[in-house]
Every structure is written in structure tokens, then in C-alpha cells.
Amino acid sequence: MDLKTFDTWRIGAVENASPAQRMAFARDTIRQVIEAAHLDDVDLDYELDGDALDALHEAMANALTTPADALKALDRRIEQGILTEGNMDPRLLFVHGAIGAWADFLATGDPTSLKHLANEAVSQIDYHFEPKIDDFLACPQMQAERDRIAVLLKA
């Protein structure tokens, strides 16, 4: 399966899922993105000011239990404290994007936000494992992501 076919399948899986399936998928996806972040190797003091760094740590530690409005406030603090505008380390960018998409999904239930969250997870895997565009699922990690999506969204 090439990248374009995979993306089309993933988007359809989100659109065709029930609200309960979407929520389960979203919760599992934000957990996965945070766990796979590997931010220990990122110079966070270079990337974020102190308040943004505190907000990032709080959002990551409590993403599954923080209400949408509080998570959106943490996301705004992160956004306001970015020091490397346009040049953020991709590992931090994936986590920051996922937190924002998760907060939006929690607030609205909008499938578009869930598609963004799912894209952050796929981008994170792509960054670490560099699957071939024309044979995307030949990469075991990408095949595992496809399987995870299929199970959670019953696609």
C-alpha cells in the first residue's frame, strides 16, 4: 500500500467510525504519541520558554484526564512560549500538534481534529522509521499502526 492509499484509508476509517470508536482511538493515539515522543534528546530549553515547558510537561502527564478547556489553555501556553518559530525539533512538533488536536477533539468531537491527531501519530512513526512511500506498510511499525487503527476504528 502506498502512502496516498494509506492516507485515504485512514481518513475513511475515521469518518466511518462511531463516536465511541473515535474516542477510544483518540485516547489511544494521544497516549501513543506522548509515550513515543523521546523528548529526552531534545533541547527543550532551546525550543520553549520556562512557562511553555511547564505547560508541555503538565499536558503530557495529564492528557487523558485534563478537561478540554484546561488542555487548550496548556496548549496556548506552549504556543506562546515557542522560541524556535518555524524550526522546531520534529519530535516536539509531533507532540505539540497532537496535544492541540486532542484538545480540539475533546472540545468538539470533530472528526477533522481526530484526523489531525492520527496524522501526528503517523508522522511520528514516519520520522523515526522512514517507510518507503510506494510500499508504506512494508515498514513493520507502519503496519502495526495500520493494524491499531483497524482494530480501534473497526475498519
Image (cartoon, helix red, strand yellow):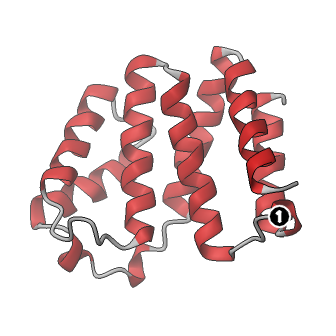
User: Would residue 123 appear left or right of 8 to someone viewing this image?
Assistant: left
Residue 130 percent location from the top left of the image: 68, 74
Q: Amino acid at mark 1?
A: Asp
Task: Give residue 134's quadrant in the image.
Answer: bottom right
Identify which residue is drawn at 45% across, 59% down.
94
Q: Secondary structure at mark 1?
A: loop
Q: Is residue 51 above or below residue 47?
A: above
Residue at image location 29% in from the left, 37% down from the top: 71
The residue beneath circle 1 is 134
- Residue 110 x/y as whole percent: 49, 20
Question: Image quarter for residue 69?
Answer: top left
Q: Is residue 28 above or below residue 91?
A: above
30 left or right, relative to 77: right
Towards the viewer: 137 or 39 = 137
Report the front residue among 121 and 87.
Answer: 87
Tell me the crowding category of disc 1: few under 14, some 14 to 19, or many 20 or more residues within 10 angstroms, Cα based: few
For the point 74% across and 38% down, the residue is: 8
Q: Residue at x 57, y 63 (%)?
A: 124
Quarter of the figure that contains the N terminus:
bottom right
Looking at the image, residue 90 sits to the left or right of residue 56; the answer is: right
Tag count in the figure?
1
Above or below, 28 relative to 47: above
Q: Is residue 65 visible?
A: no
Point out the image quarter for the C terminus: top right
Q: Is residue 43 visible?
A: yes
Instruction: Tell me where residue 98 appears, x and y as whole percent.
Output: 45, 48
97 vs 147, left or right, is: left
Q: Where is residue 86 shown, x and y percent of the image?
A: 27, 66
